[in-house]
Image (spheres, rainbow, N blue to C red):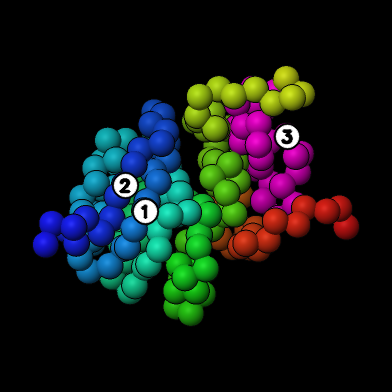
Amino acid sequence: MAQGRRHLTITTVVDAEECAVLRVAGELDVHAERQFLDESGAVIAAGHRFLVLDLTALRFCDSRGLNCLLALEWLCRRMNGRLLLASLGVRVLHVLLVTRAVDALACFPTVGHALAAVPEEIRPSWPPGGTVAADGAGSGGRDGTGSREGSEGSDGDGVKSRDPDAYRSGERERPRQGSRDRSAP
């Protein structure tokens, strides 16, 4: 039964001094709970008080997985940081909406938008690797969102990219998940 052993993979995408970006793939359930808490908790214990989880490839999250996310949020808050969720799939977003946990967790449409909510002085460059946009803006641009998201100007979903308090759930308009329409009003 070796093929059924690995339900979850966690990959470190960015490892900055106080902020890390982790890509979570697979299923976050009772079988992966301990692995998820051990691996992500170790990242927080290493001093990363801002933790961005890229959930693009997370296919499933049940109540045990939700409890894991809430536990990470609590750990980050204890260190005066925040857990930031990015690129939630429909199934994961549904769990957060049904349980109203979406009000307790900061959710963003992309990793770049989530990183814009990290205080500028500790915000890592995005995307990793230092790509350069056509306009010459590198990944370390002023808004820290990199060439893909940062070159669009305002993000159009209510998140003020230069406001360090924009990550607080009650202080910003909730981003519309899955919406790619960025046309001007």
Boundaries of the magenta span: 137-164
Give the Cα separation between the discs numbered 1 and 3. 28 Å
- Sequence-wise first label, 1 or 3: 1
- Quarter of the image where one finds residue 28: bottom left
Give the Cα separation between the discs numbered 2 and 1. 6 Å
Give the Cα separation between the discs numbered 2 and 3. 29 Å
> Which marked residue is nearer to the observer: mark 1 or mark 3?
1
| Residue 72 at x, y percent in the picture | 33, 55
Q: Amino acid at mark 1?
A: Ala
Q: What residue is shown at x 37% (from left), y 51% (from top)? A: 24
Q: Residues within 10 Å of mark 2 (few under 14, many from 20)?
A: some
Q: Amino acid at mark 3?
A: Ser
Q: Which residue is mark 1?
A: 25
Q: Which residue is mark 3?
A: 151
Principal secondary structure, stretch drawn in magenta: loop
- Sequence-wise first label, 2 or 1: 2
Q: Are marks 2 and 1 in contact (CB under 8 Å)?
A: yes
Element class at badge 3: loop
Q: Are marks 1 and 3 in contact (CB under 8 Å)?
A: no
Give left or right: position of 147 versus 2.
right
* Residue 100 visible within the image: no
Q: Which residue is mark 2?
A: 10
